[in-house]
Amino acid sequence: MSKKSTYGKVICRRSDSSGEITVAEADGIRSLSFGDTEQSKIRVGQLDALLMEYYQAMMCALVFAGKPQSVLMVGLGGGAMVNFLLQSCPSASIDAVEINEQIISLAHDYFFLPKENPRLTIIHAAGQDFIKQQADCGRRYDLILIDAFNQDGPASLMIEGEFLNTCRELLDDGGISVANLWTGPTCNFPAVYDSVNAAFAGNTLKLMLSESYGNAIVFAFKDDSMYRNLPAYRQEARRLQMKWRINFPKFFKLLYYQNFHRLQQQ
């Protein structure tokens, strides 16, 4: 989610119990908005380009995790990250769960999300219900991406202890969970981060994308072996920067400085 008013020519507008959803396009950039909040956008004809900064920051998970074989996404949006992962992780199977059926329809109709791909399963369900079902049947994922928002900010499920504990349970050894959160005055980010940190036994890093209110990405690890030595990822960050045109070195520099004191204390 990004706080920005809808711009461009409106090509679709729908309303449901969650509010108004708008698809607009300008200069080849297609966007999906809830009310006046831009939630997702793509460049038509270049689906491997991640345009929103918070998308790019969340994909730092690929620097940590290498080539995940199993991915769970909670919150679909326009499907930009799903399309990127289908191309960047060609051996991964992806489950994407979305509570709003209108969003799924719009992602297929306007954002080129494939309706038939053997590596992709779209599930219309509440995220917390789906992950509990998966945990109960012993499912495990290498990577979990959580981007569940409504018009008021992050979905409340993301700060619930049961949900967070189940996310950790769902991770395979060496797995990582990444959540897109918000630092607005009504979201109480410090308390939310404390909840995530507690559920993952302190094995978390936060990446603040703005000095004022904005997106904050939280990386939560199954154990501490993956993030203790952030400088060791410099070479891989540069390699993936060249491949996918994402400034991973910048994000890792921010991660290092924003979490320096915590890393030194561990």
Image (tube, helix red, strand yellow):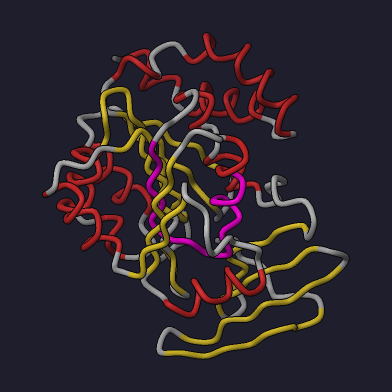
The mark total stands at 0
The answer to which of 164 and 100 lies nearer the viewer is: 100
Residue in view at x 42 percent, y 84 percent:
18
**Residue 22 point in image, percent of width and height:** 63, 81
73 falls in the magenta region: yes
The answer to which of 263 and 54 lies nearer the viewer is: 54
The answer to which of 217 and 163 lies nearer the viewer is: 163
Residue lying at the far left in this picture: please name it. 136
Answer left or right for 210 relative to 154: right
Answer left or right for 22 relative to 179: right
Residue in view at x 41 percent, y 75 percent:
100
The C terminus sits in image quarter: top left
Can you say whether 186 is above or below 178 in the image? below
Residue in view at x 50 percent, y 37 percent:
207
**Residue 103 point in image, percent of width and height:** 50, 74
The answer to which of 257 and 13 lies nearer the viewer is: 13
Can you say whether 95 is above or below 105 in the image? above
> What residue span does the magenta drawing correspond to?
70-84
Answer left or right for 72 relative to 168: right
**Residue 9 point in image, percent of width and height:** 81, 81
**Residue 187 point in image, percent of width and height:** 39, 61
